[in-house]
Amino acid sequence: MPRATGTFSIDSWDAQPYDEAEGAALSRVHVTKTFGGDLLGTSTTDIITAVAPVESSAAYAGFERFIGTVHGRKGTFVLHHTATSHAGESSLSWTVLPDSGTGELAGIRGGGQIVNDDGAHSFHLDYELG
């Protein structure tokens, strides 16, 4: 299974809180990104975040549409995100939504992880084209 690796930058982060009750604040966030490495392109992401008041615990889930190339193959696909963090430990994973690929990325499937190292974002995506 091929592995795509690289980095991405967050170009915009538009958070809209919708529930700030005791226990955790909930927000809808719209994010735009630029990718470099084996994924070259841009994306738009919409996530729902939950952040505990002390900010030592947080989680999010959402969807991202990538537009660009993977190892030189051009198209688009959708990623499903799941992430949690607590006390400095985090888990950020993504999976390709089956049947969401277009163009030369039609049939793409797989998954991987994101690493946030003090704001420097890197990723890997293990994928198959079928």
Image (cartoon, helix red, strand yellow):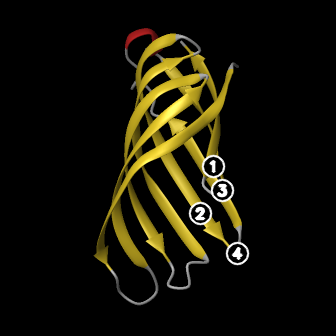
x%, y% of residue 42?
Answer: 42, 31
Q: Which residue in the structure is indicated by mark 4? A: 87
In this view, 40 is above or below 122: above
Distance of label 2 from label 1 (alpha carbons): 17 Å
- Residue 72 position, x and y percent, is 54, 11
Mark sitting earlier along the chain (4/1): 4
Q: Residues within 10 Å of mark 1 (few under 14, many from 20)?
A: few
Q: As shown in the figure, which amino acid type bears the numbered disc 3?
A: Ser
Q: Is residue 58 above or below residue 102?
A: below
> Callout 2 environment at 10 Å: few (<14), some (14 to 19), or many (20+)?
some
How far is the residue under mark 2 from the one under mark 3? 5 Å
Instruction: For the N terminus, give its image quadrant.
Output: top right
Which label sits in the foreground, 4 or 2?
4
Q: How many residues crowd around disc 4 within 10 Å: few (fewer than 14), some, or many (20 or more)?
A: few
Image depth: mark 2 or mark 1 in front: 1
Q: Mark 1 highlights which residue?
A: 120
Q: Which residue is mark 2?
A: 84
Disc 2 marks a residue whose amino acid type is: Thr
What residue is disc 3 on?
91
Marks 3/1: CA–CA distance: 15 Å
Tell me the amino acid under the disc marked 1: Ala
Q: Callout 3: few (<14), some (14-19), or many (20+) C-alpha neighbours within 10 Å?
A: some
Residue 81 is situated, as x and y percent measured from the top left of the image, at 50, 48
Residue positioned 47% across, 46% down in the render: 10
Amino acid under label 4?
Ala
Q: Give the secondary structure at mark 3.
A: strand
Residue at 40% across, 35% down: 43
Label 4 and label 3: CA atoms lie apart by: 12 Å
Between disc 3 and disc 1, the foreground one is 1
Task: Provide residue 87's location: percent of width, then percent of height.
Answer: 70, 75
